[in-house]
Image (cartoon, rainbow, N blue to C red):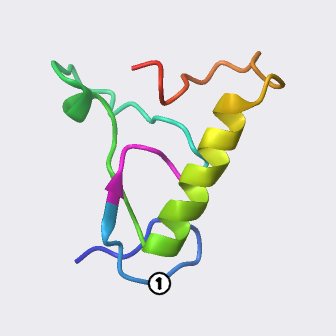
Amino acid sequence: MATCDYPECKAEGEKISRLSPEGFLVATGKKAYSFREAYRRFHYCKEHHDELMTNVWNRVRSKDDKEDDHVAPTAI
């Protein structure tokens, strides 16, 4: 099994996500016909996956910082 993609983590990456460690979708750069093909997959241990999801949902719910160029995970 793959290791966690979170920086400096060597734990087993049991959770698969389309969100990067920074909490954004990262395009594969290939012609894609579905969400699954369009965005890279990342592996996370449970601890880092939970932390990532908490940070993303806090950012999505926050009224601040909506001027960046990143697509919200809920926009797709």
Left or right: where 51 falls relative to 31: right
Residue picked out by circle 1:
10
Quadrant of the rendered image containing residue 52 = bottom right
Q: Residue 31: x, y in percent?
A: 21, 19
User: Tag 1, which secondary structure?
Assistant: loop
Q: Residue 18: x, y in percent?
A: 37, 43
Q: Which residues are magenta?
A: 16-21
Q: Determine if the magenta segment contains residue 29.
A: no
The amino acid type of the residue labelled 1 equals Lys
Q: Determine if the magenta segment contains residue 20.
A: yes
Determine the residue positioned at 55% across, 25% down.
72
Determine the residue positioned at 60% across, 62% down.
51
Quadrant of the rendered image containing residue 4 = bottom left
Q: Residues within 10 Å of mark 1 (few under 14, many from 20)?
A: few
Q: How would you classify the magenta stretch by its main secondary structure?
A: loop
* Quadrant of image for the C terminus: top left
Left or right: where 31 falls relative to 23: left
Determine the residue positioned at 33% across, 27% down.
29
Looking at the picture, tell me which residue is in the foreground, 20 or 63: 63
Quadrant of the rendered image containing residue 64 = top right
* Quadrant of image for the N terminus: bottom left
Looking at the picture, tell me which residue is in the foreground, 38 or 52: 52
| Vertical placement of residue 60 versus 54, above or below | above
Q: Identify the residue at the far left of this view.
A: 33
